[in-house]
Image (cartoon, grey):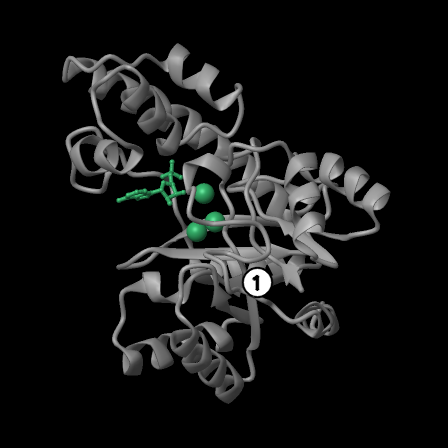
């Protein structure tokens, strides 16, 4: 079993990179990818722990793309040295800081009990995003749960929402390839497309250099996973998978097993590796 999608305190996960790797090993994973949003700063710590535990650590990150629905791309085999992808990730993190300031200002204007200092402390100073705003709103009594905080204040269209810089899909696929990595479409159903449209969009993305898509996803049921695998096979895409573990921010998702029955085959990693540029 492997897990190619996880988040740590370096973005909006609640657990340290070391702990993410420990949980993967405990779940029986032979390999784990840390895929924090917009950065790879947690990789070195995850890799050190993975070596101690005899687990393979895949360097990854997750980037939000501009699309009608929600399009997230996972990049794998991302080096931490200078590369076109790392340059883009730096820009995304800088823009996120500006966005966080604006979200704090808007929520303050709404009279809500949340400051950028609270949110920064909640996030441990790095990788700050909406889930951290949500956690503070819950703690300070302005929402009953993280989901309630999103629904009322933080979701797209809600009064505290500020859009974040997104990258064109074609650009991220090109950056990943030019940086020696491969790109995989995360949780493909979040594109919000009907089955036929999804096939057309995936063909387009495959033509632009997409390597795989996440068919074995923590929250998809077995028949959905099987349908996505056959779609991927038909397009020559590697059928990948992972839990999208975020610790307490998404308490229904566990490392390795997702909602309980996830079991991504080991061979998926070898297939991805064989597609490295
Ligand atoms: P950000 O990168 O700051 O925009 O935050 C994205 C995170 O917020 C992801 O982990 C999402 O799962 C979570 N998120 C986005 N929209 C919603 C929503 N409507 N309800 C709950 N969580 C959401
Ligand atoms: Zn996340
Ligand atoms: Fe995602
Ligand atoms: Fe994710």
The location of residue 77, given as percent across then percent down, is: 70, 55
Determine the residue positioned at 44% across, 77% down. Answer: 228
Task: Pick whichever, 174 or 235, lies toward us.
Answer: 235
Where residue 69 sits in the image (x, y, percent)? Answer: 28, 58
Q: Residue furthest bottom?
A: 234
55 or 199, nearer to the observer? 55
Q: How many marks?
A: 1
Q: Which residue carries the number 1 mark?
A: 183
Q: Is residue 224 above or below residue 126?
A: below
Residue at coordinates 81% horizontally, 38% vertically from top-left? 48
Above or below — where is 91 with respect to 50? above
The answer to whether any part of residue 277 appears in the image is: no
Q: Secondary structure at mark 1?
A: strand
Q: At x 50% / y 69%, what residue is drawn?
A: 213
Compared across the picture, whether 45 is left or right of 221 comes to right
Looking at the rendered image, the quarter that the C terminus falls into is: bottom right
Query: Is the residue marked by circle 1 packed among few (<14), some (14-19), or many (20+) residues within 10 Å?
Result: many
43 above or below 102? below
For the N terminus, give its image quadrant. Answer: bottom right
Q: In the rendered image, which quarter is residue 193 located in?
A: bottom left
């Amino acid at each position: 079993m492997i897990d190619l999608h996880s988040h740590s305190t370096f973005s909006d996960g609640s657990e340290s990179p070391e702990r993410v790797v420990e949980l993967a090993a405990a779940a029986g994973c032979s390999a784990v990818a840390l895929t924090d949003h917009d950065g790879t700063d947690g990789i070195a710590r995850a890799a050190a722990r993975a070596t101690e535990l005899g687990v393979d650590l895949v360097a990854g990150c997750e980037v939000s793309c501009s699309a009608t629905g929600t399009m997230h791309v996972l990049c794998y085999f991302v080096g931490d040295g200078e590369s076109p992808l790392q340059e883009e990730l730096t820009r995304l993190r800088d823009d996120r800081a500006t966005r966080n300031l604006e979200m704090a200002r808007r929520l303050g204007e709404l009279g809500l009990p949340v400051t950028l200092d609270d949110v920064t402390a909640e996030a441990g100073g790095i990788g700050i995003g909406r889930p951290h705003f949500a956690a503070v709103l819950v703690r300070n009594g302005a929402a009953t749960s993280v989901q309630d905080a999103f629904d009322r204040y933080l979701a797209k269209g809600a009064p505290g929402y500020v859009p974040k810089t997104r990258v064109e899909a074609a650009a991220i696929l090109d950056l990943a390839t030019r940086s020696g990595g491969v790109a995989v479409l995360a949780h493909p159903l979040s594109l919000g497309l009907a089955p036929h449209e999804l096939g057309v969009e995936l063909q387009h993305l495959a033509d632009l250099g997409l390597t795989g898509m996440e068919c074995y996803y923590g929250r998809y049921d077995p028949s959905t996973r099987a349908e996505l695998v056959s779609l991927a096979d038909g397009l020559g895409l590697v059928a990948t998978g992972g839990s999208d573990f975020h610790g307490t921010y998404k308490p229904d998702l566990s490392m390795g097993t997702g909602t309980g029955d996830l079991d991504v085959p080991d061979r998926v990693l070898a297939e991805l590796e064989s597609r490295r540029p």
